[in-house]
Amino acid sequence: MINFGIEFVPRDLYWKTTFYAIQAEKTGFNTLWITDHFNNRNVYVSLAIVSAYTDKIKFGPGVTNPYMAHPIVTAQAVSTLNEIAPGRVICGIGVGDRTTLEMVNMKPSKPLATIRESVNIIREITSGRNLEMRGEVFTVSGAKLNYKTTSKIPIFVGAQGPKMLALAAEIGDGVLINASHPEDIKNAIGFISEGAVNAGKRVEDLEIAAYTSFSVAKTPEKAAKAVIPVVAYIVAGCPESVLQKHGISMETADKIRQAIIKGQWKEAFLQITDGMVEAFSIYGTPETVVEKIAKLVKVGTTQIVAGSPIGPDMRKSINMIAAEIFPHFRSKEDRTN
Amino acid sequence: MALEKMVEKIPSSSWEATSEKLIDIVLNSPDANKMPSGLAKTILYYWQRDQLATKIGLERLLEASMIIDTEKTIGVLKELGFQELVATLESR
């Protein structure tokens, strides 16, 4: 069975995000991810209220980053959430969104070492152990939570480039592939498989999620229009290797990034071509989206995350996914469990 | 007249449709930030329990949609044919 996740950006009022979270649970989504950007509402406060109004759905930051939040703080936050909603918390971590980091002059330096050490810190601390470590990036001298932790928190590593994908497979319980195009996902799964084998793990034991920019609507035009702002952010923060694969120059990406940083949205969105939308999102009518998801499943994805914007009308799009997309990938029994 | 009495003017056969329309107003209005936090939490409580299309859920939705967008709420109620309720709301 394929799992379905949903991503919310807490740019919306807290009660709207919570309303949609309840809807996502009712309609049968398995996981719920809330993004972590300093300029939106706080991810853990948002997740705490979501946890209070839901009972089954798994949820977590999707993704947090160790540059804005020290991993020990992340460990503290997710283990507190896991006390509120035992067994439902998942933790997504990655290098973060380049554009937002740049706004506060943060450089995602030593990304591989930073993520490796962060995952170790989060795993050790959330397991209730006492941690002593001297890493390349972080040093922890005898850190331990003052309260008892409950169940294990699965850690998902967000990744896009080959080395990070391999590392994600090595150290993560799951991988969140930041891509939407079947070719990108297929390549990513190749690197994930290599990473898993090198670490002596079975790739089948990993949850491999395509963390997509997603927009479903009754017409392809409406779906595409809704997804353009998100695609702008993706292109702006994309590694050069991925841009090259889709024939996009670094100059164009830089231009979009600078426009976003300056708040020149129109300027940024005007640069987005149909090809970019095609490469970096899953969009269209339910029928088209089903075809696109099927391609991702075929190459080995085990979870599809419907990321922002979901669609031009969030409530209608969530219902559309449940009614017109889930049935193609799940039995009726799966959907009611 | 209290909201409780007003909602009684909506026939139970129309609760579902009314609830759907009022939810749309509340979620999609550019003035959604006018929603009082306490009322938002009450609505979430009823939503979690599938009670937004009940008398008590409709009371709270109607309260919220009147705060957020009175004009649109009146319009939707007219569209649904609840003239008596509209007259009561307009005379408040």
Image: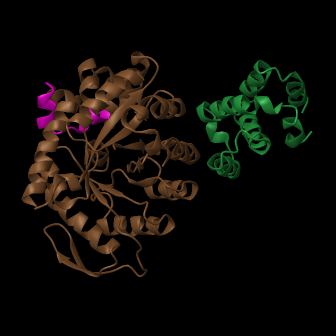
Does any portion of residue B24 appear in the rendered image? yes
Viewer-proximal residue among B43 and A276: B43
Position of residue A303 relative to residue B74, above or below, is below
Residue placed at 37% from the left, 27% from the top?
Answer: A227
**Among the 4 quarters of the image, the one containing residue A122:** bottom left
Report whether A21 appears left or right of A220: right
In the rendered structure, which segment of residues is drawn in magenta?
Answer: A232-247
Judged left or right of residue A102, residue A225 is: right
Quadrant where the N terminus of chain A lies? Answer: top left
Q: Please name the color used to draw chain B.
A: green
Q: Is residue B56 magenta?
A: no
At 66% across and 31% down in the image, what residue appears? B20
Residue A144 appears at what percent x and percent y? 33, 80
Q: Is residue B54 above or below residue A223?
A: below
**Magenta span: chief secondary structure:** helix
Specify the quadrant of the image occupied by residue A141.
Answer: bottom left
